[in-house]
Amino acid sequence: MSPTVMAIIMLVVVIACILWNKIPMNFIMFVVPFVCSLLLGYTLSETSSFILTQISTVMQSAGYMLLFGLVYFTMLTETGMFDIIVGALLKLIGNKMNVVVVMIMTSIIGAVGYLTANMSTTYLICFPIMIPLFKKFKLDQRYAFILCQTAISAMCFLPWGIGLVNSAMMAGCDATELAAASIPWGLCFLPAIVLQWVYFSMCHRKKYGTLGLPEGVTLDNAGTAETKKEENPNARPKLFWFNLIVFVCVIVTLAVFQVPSYLVFIAGSIITSMVNYPKNFSQIWNKAGTTFFNVLVMLIAICFYLAVFNAAPEDGSKVSMVNALATAMTGIFPEFLMKYMFLIFLVLVVPIVHFVPYQVYNAMYPLFISVGATFGMGSIAIIAPFVCNLGLATSVTPMNSATYVGCTLCEIDDVNAYTNWGGVIMFFTNLVVIAVALITGVLSF
């Protein structure tokens, strides 16, 4: 069968199965590409060789870093270190709060919380603390979700983040190289975040006539006992400074000395667990290991998809599906549109992901790269814009389970209404980020 036709069939089947939502996505990514490879005429041995090579490449470039990074940050979150940092920030602000300060704090806590590289964990850090303050000021609680998610998106360049690792896998590049290229995009979010503060402040002032507390309302207990999460039996407040020093050492070792990341995270995990949980360290490792296993299965499933999508014999006797599809699209679409294909999809990322799972966007990266290569564009230059900007779309789509987690914590009852409203906000936020990137030269083509 033609690799072009097979590529279209595989994409359609994968997207249809994800939309159907009756089969786990990992199973889809395992089975569908494997069957397509056999239908293309590859033997079981050849297919296995493609897959094993892909798994080896991904694990060496990013997989081990991601897995052990998740273990370390799971432990660090359990110690309560991030909770203490946020609590100190609240205490520092004190009675100087108004609507603008509350929104600024939401963005800062969202950014700090995403050092865990986990969106749901960031929500659990940010929203239980900030939502009571939003209620005090009668501030729309939907704003909290938008502000937190935008801050998270700006931080998506973290090399231990699963989103960046997924993108690096699709781009076939090193995660740290892609992270370095994505940092300027994260900085382009700063004007957009400020504009969100201004816009939401204007909306609130128009509705209530003030940016301060409503008449008769005080800040007594706000941000303290009222906002605390349930007691964490694994919290170690007395070891805060030790954990913070270890955390700083981990970051410095990664960024300055460039020690292999998986070794750094393994060392950080061992030190953190042995010092904080000397009597039950195995329990905390088991808890972190659950996340480790789930991510490992996901990584291997994506490797199946990538291996088959890019599969081609070394003797050149067959063309890969991604190259065949790119050639076909180049012949159909005008050249000027093909050159800007990735930019068109970048502009439309929010409305598209509203209806299509973001994983499908990741699956399209090899196509963008192959098309861009025909115009002399590198893979990192094409994928780097999506690393942070895709994060804007993932919180305003009913296709993502994390949306429901955030809405529950923000006490937003109508998820569909929120995603429709939030989709408009994030669409314009995405446009602002792209415009800033164009003006500053971060985006060039």
Image (tube, helix red, strand yellow):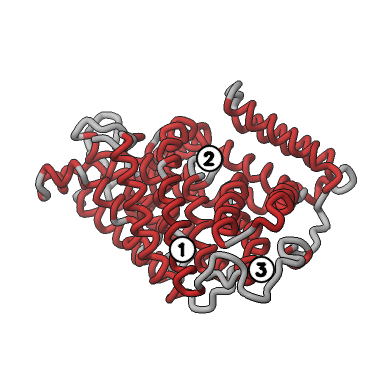
Tell me the SS state at disc 1.
helix
Specify the label residue 389 is tagged with.
none
Amino acid at dot 2: Leu
Indicate the quadrant where residue 379 lies: top left
Expressed as whole percent of the image width and height from the top left, the position of residue 85 reads 71, 47
In the rendered image, is residue 295 in sight? no
| Residue 119 position (above or below residue 242) | below
Residue at the disc numbered 1? 200
Q: Position of residue 307 (x, y in %)?
A: 38, 42
In front: label 1 or label 3: 1
Q: Decide if residue 182 is on the left or right side of residue 214.
A: left
The percent position of residue 11, horizontal first and vertical second, equals 30, 57
In the rendered image, which quarter is residue 409 located in?
bottom right
Amino acid at the residue labelled 3: Pro
> Disc 1 versus disc 2: distance between alpha carbons?
28 Å
From mark 1 to mark 3, how far is it between C-alphas?
Answer: 18 Å
> In the image, 317: left or right of 157?
left
**Residue type, label 1:** Phe
Q: CA distance from mark 3 to mark 2?
A: 29 Å
The quarter of the image holding the C terminus is top left
Residue 132's tag is 3
x 84%, y 39%: residue:
275
Residue toward you, 163 or 418: 418
Position of 22 relative to 333 (above/below): below
Query: Residue at coordinates 36% horizontally, 61% vertically from top-left?
Result: 353
Please tell me whether mark 2 sits on a helix, a strand or a loop. loop
Q: Which mark is residue 158?
A: 2
